[in-house]
Amino acid sequence: MTTQSNAAYGLAELKKELTFGGIGATKARDIPRIDISGFDKRKAEIAEQLWTASTEIGFFQLINHSIPQELIDEAFAMTERFFALPHETKSRYPLVKGTNAGWEYKSQGRPSTGIPDQKESYQITLPRMAGLWPTGDELPGSRR
């Protein structure tokens, strides 16, 4: 990444991203638990907590969200089944540039550092998922 493009980051929080993604040591951190009860009345407070956790830690756990545990367990099980599919099957549902929807494998790079991510992901953006859901034969119970 060039110095000129680094200058385009105006917010101090975004400048922190320049330090993400590099190879180095890990350090123990507590994962913040963010209470989202009373969301309508606490929206700004919750948004600040989410931003801080995302930029300083990279992870957070939501509590008091009212999503039934059964639904959460089902989503994790479906995710595990999706990523267990053969590479060839998942590649039928590629990330569509500019949509934040679809599957990708070790192809995303951090814009601020230019360091490639070493992961695969399946991004779901509901209004943009046409043609990106695995078939019921490939992944029984998936949304198509």
Image (cartoon, rainbow, N blue to C red):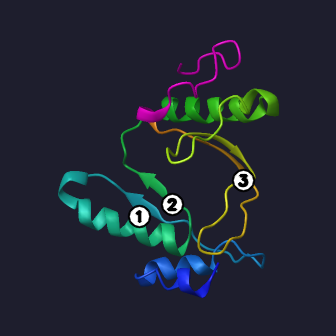
Image x and y of residue 102, in percent: 59, 38
Q: Residue shown at 70%/78% (left/top)?
A: 27
Q: Amino acid at mark 1?
A: Leu
Mark found first going from the N terminus, 3 or 2: 2
Q: CA distance from mark 1 to mark 2?
A: 7 Å
What is the secondary structure assignment of the residue under circle 2? loop
Is residue 112 shown left or right of residue 120? left
Magenta highlight range = 126-144
Q: Is residue 88 visible?
A: yes
Image x and y of residue 124, in percent: 52, 38
Q: Are marks 1 and 2 in contact (CB under 8 Å)?
A: yes
Q: CA distance from mark 3 to mark 1?
A: 26 Å
Q: Amino acid at mark 2?
A: Phe
Q: Which residue is label 3 attached to?
A: 107
Numbered tag placed on residue 60 in the rendering:
2
Q: Residue shown at 38%/68% (left/top)?
A: 49
Decide: is 66 above or below 55: above
Q: Main secondary structure of the magenta part?
A: loop
Numbered tag placed on residue 50 in the rendering:
1
Does residue 75 show up magenta in the picture?
A: no
Q: Are marks 3 and 2 in contact (CB under 8 Å)?
A: no
Q: Is residue 68 visible?
A: no
Decide: is 122 above or below 41: above
Question: Where on the picture, by quarter, is residue 123?
Answer: top right
Mark found first going from the N terminus, 1 or 2: 1
